[in-house]
Image: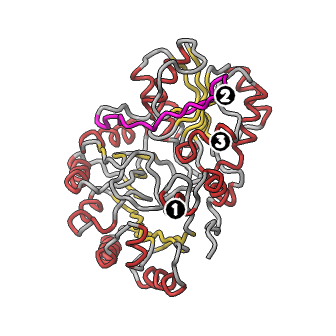
Amino acid sequence: MARVLLIKTRAGNMKKFGTGAAPPLGLLSLISFARQERPGRHEFRLIDERVHLPTNNEYASILAEFAPDLIGLSVLSSDAQRLHATTALFARLCPQTPVLIGGPHASAHQAALLDRVEVDFVLAGEGELGFVELLDSLDAGERYPASPVVGLSYRRDDNVVVENAPNTRMIDMDNAPWPAWDLIDFDDYADLTRMAPISHGKFAPLFTSRGCPYRCTYCHEIFSKKFRAKNPVAVVDEIEYLMRERGIEEFEVFDDIFNLDYDRAMGICREIVARNLKPRLLFPNGIRGDLLDRPLLEALRAAGTIHLAFAVETATPRLQKLSRKNNRLEKLSENIAIAEELGIFPFGFFMLGFPTETREEIEATIEFAVKSKLNGALFFQVIPFAGTEMAKAYFTDDAGQQALGALAGTAETGIAP
């Protein structure tokens, strides 16, 4: 049985970047999908560096004891500052073990990472299908895949770089297995900093859908622009399992856009109420604020919603159009007020420093936040992350986009005034 070690990396400076820590849904989904598609063929071990960062000696002991046949790292751009040291450590400790990088940072840079860190494979985009295909190749004793693997980049022994396009064959959300919850001790995450500004200890993250059809210039396309969603019964089945079998009462929904399908969102709320489950629901992202209305907000509250994040971004119609966010600002203000009236904690996200943004436009955004019924807000500097349309507009090569990763979580934009 092949052994696979999967690692959720963390930022080098946790005081600067925080944790935003939840059980790593991406890695847990890879594991459960591989178990479903290739039952009994792989043993998985999971390390979350945000829960405990192993020392070099601890990693040496883990690698010697587990002897993995593949090491996989899930990396955010804010984690990338430690990536070189981490991959160099694995290259020294187990030089014959292939190393795979996935996650948002891999999706942004793809094959370019092969020149920067000691890594054998880079997997971009939605990873389940490509991950299983790579495991099949390694199980067959192939040093490199004999046939194309979606989203996979690598360098052959003859120094030729192979870069396969990210996956266009998306998994069926209704038939996808639940994340590998058996590998998670939810108590490990109870006291870590959360994405939501209000929290009550032990919780579970949820993906009820993937993808977003909107084309904001600053946003990723990891899950593609095609919206795919679980049906309400499937969503609530997972919630009920986690409540009854794992003692979870609080859930953070991590969708890109939970409420794109209005009827589905209403259906989830009604199913929760019908089963008398009484969870606490938080949406630290994933709600399109101007697609809400009073009936849906009332349904969300009845289903247990206690927190909604409204991604306003900018209060300037010109910049709404330029960024292609295209929020209807009056509708947002109305829905924020309704949420606050219903006892839902409304929180705002704003972006400052858009290209061409004026001082007056920045002040208008701040004024919008102050005058609204938001209970709190965060203001972020605009960072054109590699791979986004905004980055491509200002940086024509990957080297320029690479430098942007170091700006994650800072007050720098990478763009001169």
Determine whether the residue tagged by mark 3 lies in a helix, strand or loop.
Answer: loop
* Residue 3 drawn above or below residue 100: above
Determine whether the residue tagged by mark 1 lies in a helix, strand or loop.
Answer: helix
- Give the residue pinned by disc 3: 49
Q: Locate residue 88 relative to residue 367 in the image: left or right.
A: right
Magenta residue span:
153-174
CA separation, marks 2 and 1? 30 Å
Asked if the residues shown at circle 2 and circle 1 are in contact, with their CB atoms under 8 angstroms apart, the answer is: no
Q: Residue 338 at what x, y percent from top left?
A: 29, 74
In the rendered image, which quarter contains the N terminus? top right
Q: Earlier in the sequence, mark 2 or mark 1?
A: 2
Question: Per the image, is 159 magenta?
Answer: yes
Q: Nearer the viewer, residue 145 or 90?
A: 145
Number of other residues with Cα within 10 Å of mark 1, as a class: few under 14, some 14 to 19, many 20 or more = few
Q: Locate residue 321 relative to residue 15 in the image: left or right.
A: left
Q: Main secondary structure of the magenta part?
A: loop
- Give the residue pinned by disc 1: 393
Residue depicted at x 24% and y 60%: 299
Q: Residue 327 at what x, y percent from top left?
A: 34, 70
Residue type at tag 3 = Glu
Q: Earlier in the sequence, mark 3 or mark 2?
A: 3
Question: Per the image, is 145 magenta?
Answer: no
Tag in front: 3 or 2: 2
* Residue 197 drawn above or below residue 36: below
- Give the residue pinned by disc 2: 159
Q: Earlier in the sequence, mark 1 or mark 3?
A: 3
Q: Nearer the viewer, residue 299 or 177?
A: 177
Tag in front: 1 or 3: 1
